[in-house]
Image (cartoon, helix red, strand yellow):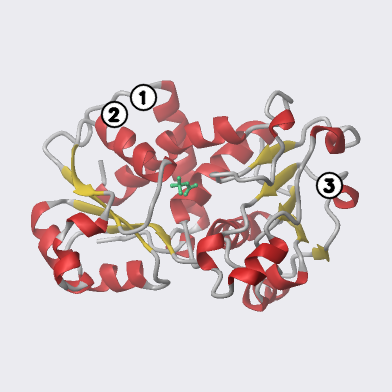
């Protein structure tokens, strides 16, 4: 039984298989491969895209959905533990998709569950299915995953999406530019991973000057909910705002990705620019998640 807690739970070959399957699902999105299966979606933290795209994916595969989007309406509010909740739900469902604010919660769930777990985000740690849809979006727009120049911008400290994406892109020989204020710099452990693999990266604090060579500009939100000190959040919350005029001298093939939700970090005047891809990227989540579910359930 395989779970997907970290993107490193999938090999490079696994990832490529999932992307190929995602393309097949995009071409033919209604396939009743989960007929008779029940999938639980347990969201202990708010979500729009991840939960709804998982539920769309399950529906398009002909499966049934149980779960919650607000843990306060469950017996957790009476003191039931995460362990007991997972043990229970594993009796009801063939697969559990869970989002939790605590780093490591999904790994813990995978250790005690008798059905596979998909991590739909655990604190600032990992968001592996976001990475699968990001890779799918990069492959679709650039025609390859190899040798991509990717600028990661914003909250690189707490941003679980950039942590997972860095690990995956490092398998394909990317070149990374990290653009973040000092307080939100990419954590040392991820830079060490790149160094160990001989992969080049640069670090900058200025946005406009360092996106000219990018194939992908990966914007992120500064995540208020991860800050212990509200004053620190206030200091950095609007540090980068990508504006349409900044894209004038960027490469013709560049695409702007963002896991969303956005707050202020991409001006709405970018939305109509053909280089903006973030809404299509969110749409790709359905196909990538259909493929990830089928990989784990062997459907
Ligand atoms: N990208 C993403 O995880 O969005 P949600 O928080 O809306 O699920």
Give coordinates of residue 146: x percent, y percent.
Answer: 69, 47
Q: Are marks 1 and 2 in contact (CB under 8 Å)?
A: yes
Q: Quadrant of residue 21?
A: top left
Vertically, is 132 above or below 236? above
Q: Which class describes the residues within 10 Å of circle 3: few (<14), some (14-19), or many (20+)?
A: many
- Residue 259 appears at what percent x and percent y? 56, 46
Q: Which residue is mark 2?
A: 60
Give the distance between the C-alpha atoms of the residues marked 1 and 3, in whole angstroms: 35 Å
Q: Secondary structure at mark 2?
A: helix
Could you tell me if residue 14 is visible in this image? no
The correct choice, above or below, for 275 with respect to 78 in the image is above
**x 72%, y 37%: residue:** 267
Residue 40: x and y in percent read: 21, 49
Q: Residue at x 51, y 42 (%)?
A: 133
Q: Does dot 3 land on a helix, a strand or a loop?
A: loop
Tell me how far mark 1 sits from mark 2, CA to CA: 6 Å
Mark 3 or mark 2: which comes first in sequence?
2
Query: Mark 1 falls on what kind of element?
Result: loop
Q: Badges 1 and 3: C-beta atoms under 8 Å apart?
A: no
Is residue 236 shown to the viewer in this render?
yes
User: What residue is shown with label 1?
Assistant: 29
Q: What residue is pinned by disc 3? A: 211
Residue sitting nearer the eye, 294 or 131: 131
Q: Single out the mark in the foreground, 1 or 3.
A: 3
Q: Earlier in the sequence, mark 1 or mark 2?
A: 1
Q: Nearer the viewer, mark 3 or mark 2?
A: 3
For label 2, count other residues whose C-alpha is less than 10 Å away and answer few (under 14), some (14-19) or many (20+): many
Mark toward the start of the polypeptide (1 vs 3): 1
- Classify mark 1: residues with Cα within 10 Å, few (<14), some (14-19) or many (20+): some
Q: Position of residue 41 (x, y in %)?
A: 26, 49
């Amino acid at each position: 039984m395989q779970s997907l807690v970290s993107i490193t739970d999938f090999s490079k070959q696994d990832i490529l298989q999932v992307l190929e399957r995602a393309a097949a699902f995009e071409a033919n999105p209604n396939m009743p491969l989960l007929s008779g299966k029940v999938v639980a979606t347990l969201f202990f933290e708010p979500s729009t895209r991840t939960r709804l795209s998982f539920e769309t994916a399950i529906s398009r595969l002909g499966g049934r959905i149980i779960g919650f989007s607000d843990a306060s309406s469950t017996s957790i509010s009476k003191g039931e533990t995460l362990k007991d909740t997972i043990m229970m739900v594993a009796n009801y469902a063939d697969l559990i998709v869970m989002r939790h604010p605590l780093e490591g919660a999904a790994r813990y769930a995978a250790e005690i569950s008798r059905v596979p777990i998909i991590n739909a985000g655990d604190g600032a740690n990992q968001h592996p299915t976001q990475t699968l849809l990001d890779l799918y979006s990069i492959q679709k727009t650039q025609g390859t995953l190899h040798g991509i120049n990717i600028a990661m911008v914003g909250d690189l400290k707490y941003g679980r999406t950039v942590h997972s994406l860095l690990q995956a892109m490092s398998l394909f020989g990317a070149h990374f530019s990290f653009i973040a204020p000092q307080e939100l710099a990419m954590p040392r452990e991820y830079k060490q991973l790149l160094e160990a693999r001989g992969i080049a990266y640069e670090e900058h604090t200025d946005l406009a000057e360092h996106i000219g060579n990018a194939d992908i500009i990966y914007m992120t939100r500064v995540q208020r909910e991860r800050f212990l000190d509200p004053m620190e959040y206030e200091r950095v919350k609007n540090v980068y705002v990508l504006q349409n005029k900044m894209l004038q001298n960027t490469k013709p093939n560049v695409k702007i990705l963002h896991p969303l939700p956005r707050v202020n970090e991409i001006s709405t005047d970018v939305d109509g620019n053909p280089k903006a891809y973030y809404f299509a990227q969110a749409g790709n989540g359905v196909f990538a998640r259909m493929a990830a579910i089928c990989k784990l359930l062997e459907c």
